[in-house]
């Protein structure tokens, strides 16, 4: 399983190195991008996603194979399964917050543009912003419901 973590680290380091290379030596506008660029980035992306999927599937097997925590274990100690459960519970909030941020940006910009031209539409634009922000609230509610299941 550690080789998958090393593989993911190497692909991430490759993308960072490629970014540094293009920061130091930017391609000229009149010249097309190097032919190896798309292939390199595509290969790194495929390897990274495959390593993540492998780590997920192999990691789940390792977690399920763990012996249960003894009754006399310290109260502050969290098992691997409980840690993964807490991370999994946080994912809906993270994704909903990202979605709300993506939604609020254009809606907020459009509502500011409308308010400058027609100030009487302030209430209507506020409703649209509230609907976009409601996405994050739904993610938080799902997280709270999942926390109650632990």
Image (cartoon, rainbow, N blue to C red):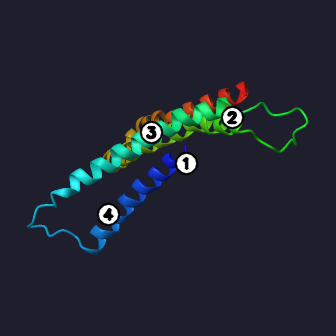
The local crowd at label 1, few if under 14, some if 14 to 19, many if 20 or more residues have their Cα within 10 Å, is few
Compare marks 4 and 3 and give the one earlier in the sequence: 4
Compare marks 3 and 1 and give the one earlier in the sequence: 1
Compare marks 3 and 2 and give the one earlier in the sequence: 2
Q: Which residue is mark 1?
A: 2
Q: Which residue is mark 2?
A: 81
Q: SS for tag 4? A: helix
Q: SS for tag 3? A: helix
What whole-number distance in Å separates the C-alpha atoms at marks 2 and 1? Answer: 18 Å
**Relative vertical location of residue 80 with respect to residue 2 in this rendering, above or below:** above
Residue 14, horizontal then vertical, whole percent: 37, 59
What whole-number distance in Å separates the C-alpha atoms at marks 1 and 4? Answer: 24 Å
What whole-number distance in Å separates the C-alpha atoms at marks 4 and 2? Answer: 36 Å
Q: Which residue is mark 3?
A: 99
Q: Are marks 1 and 4 in contact (CB under 8 Å)?
A: no
Residue 46, horizontal then vertical, whole percent: 34, 43
Could you tell me which residue is drawn at 34 percent across and 47 percent down?
45
């Amino acid at each position: 399983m550690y080789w998958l973590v090393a593989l993911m680290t190497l692909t991430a380091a490759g993308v960072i190195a490629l970014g540094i290379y293009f920061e130091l030596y930017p391609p000229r506008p009149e010249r097309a991008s190097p032919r190896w660029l798309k292939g390199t980035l595509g290969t790194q992306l495929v390897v990274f996603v495959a390593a993540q999927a492998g780590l997920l599937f192999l990691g789940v097997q390792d977690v399920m194979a763990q012996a249960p925590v003894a009754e006399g274990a310290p109260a502050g100690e969290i098992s691997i399964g409980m840690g993964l459960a807490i991370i999994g519970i946080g994912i809906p909030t993270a994704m909903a917050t990202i979605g709300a941020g993506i939604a609020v940006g254009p809606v907020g910009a459009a509502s500011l543009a409308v308010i400058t031209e027609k100030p009487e539409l302030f209430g209507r634009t506020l409703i649209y912003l509230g609907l976009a922000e409601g996405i994050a609230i739904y993610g938080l509610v799902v997280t709270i419901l999942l926390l109650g299941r632990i």
